[in-house]
Image: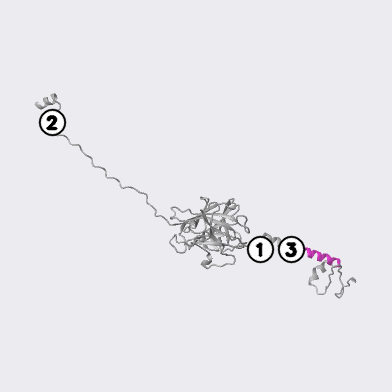
Amino acid sequence: MFLLLCALCFPGILSGLMPAATARTLPEPTPAPPVHAPVAPALPFYQSNWNAFPAGGTPDDWIDPERDGYHYPWLYPGNWHIVASPDNPAIQYYEQSQQLPQPALTFRRYDGMAFGQDNGLLPVYYHVDVTMRPIQSKYFFAPVGEAAVQVYYLDPTHYVEIDVRNTQVMLWEDDGGFPGQANNWILYWSQPLQTHPGQNRRVGADVDTVHHLITIYIEGHAVAMLNLPFISTRPHWVALRAAGQWIDYASVRIQELPPPYQVLHLAPATGQTFGSVPWWQSPRRLALIALCLLVVLWQCVRLIQKRRKMGMSDQQLVMAPFSRDMRFVLDTRKTRPVEGGVADRPDRG
């Protein structure tokens, strides 16, 4: 009772008599481990550096296919060398300047070790990006010529190339074709693209040799994807080519790509062939045959008219080629039937 009265009269007295309450401390939450996105290993790549070579020299990681043992009458070494840009002397290009009439092709195949192979072999997934500048073509598709990159190259007669010409860009497959003839060349894709001499053109491709896919890039933009069964995992390279024209290559980049997360299942592309066709499908040959038949028919009509003038009946006209008794002589000025096979010719004196 006494304590209750003290508490009512003196409220703070109990605080000195009772022990102080201790604050309850909650345990700190265990921090979650940091979450990092998986870092993909850096994939190898090749980037041309023409400035590393002296003007007039040649990069040792691009070779002539003749060093691989290929020799053809139309395959020429060309004049490939490092040259300073006319716009900026501090920038150098890889140039081919020897111009020849067709048939004439000159190649340079990548032969470096950027992808772990001592002969330039490429991985199964890769991207090619090339900036080139056609200068002049005096003999073939003037004035630009064929500014081409073999984005999938096996040898000088087997490859897939992106080809830039005066008014269009195309994707070709060469499966054993030679320059100057149309057999074994297949055109799979084309689109209009105006190109002038001295103008830079950037072309490229994603190449998936496992699934036979190629994605075409023009000026850095993907424009088409095709399924080409010709593209496979067999040993393959990248090459540069000049078709007898003067051309500069400003930059070449080859980048290994990771396997695709998702693969588009495309039907094999259908291309346009330009090989020889059977004679009955050639309009030019059919026209020539028709002309020959007309000439033969006209000669037959003239012969029949001459024989009618000789007084031969229709039966004799029909049987004359098979009769041994009917003999006649045709004269350029006058023809008539004779007995005994001797004609009375007019006096020419």
**Residue 284 in which image quadrant:** bottom right
- Going by the numbered disc 2, the residue's amino acid type is Gly
Callout 2 environment at 10 Å: few (<14), some (14 to 19), or many (20+)?
Answer: few
Q: Which mark is residue 279?
A: 1
* Mark 3: secondary structure: helix
Given contact means CB atoms under 8 Å apart, are the residues at marks 1 and 3 in contact? no
Look at the image and tell me whether residue 1 can be seen.
no
Q: Percent from the top left, x then y, of residue 221? A: 51, 49
Q: CA distance from mark 1 to mark 2?
A: 123 Å
Stretch of the chain drawn in magenta: 294-311
Q: Residue at x 14, y 24 (%)?
A: 8
- Going by the numbered disc 3, the residue's amino acid type is Leu
Q: Which mark is residue 293?
A: 3
Given contact means CB atoms under 8 Å apart, are the residues at marks 1 and 2 in contact? no
Q: Nearer the viewer, mark 1 or mark 2?
A: 2
Q: Percent from the top left, x then y, of residue 220? A: 51, 50
Answer with left or right where residue 21 lies relative to residue 231: left
Q: Quadrant of the N terminus?
A: top left
Look at the image and tell me whether residue 248 can be seen.
yes
Q: Percent from the top left, x then y, of residue 76? A: 57, 64
Farthest-out residue, bottom: 340
Q: Residue at x 66, y 60 (%)?
A: 282
**Residue 248 in which image quadrant:** bottom right
Dot placed on the residue nearer the N-terminal end, 1 or 3: 1
Dot placed on the residue nearer the N-terminal end, 1 or 2: 2
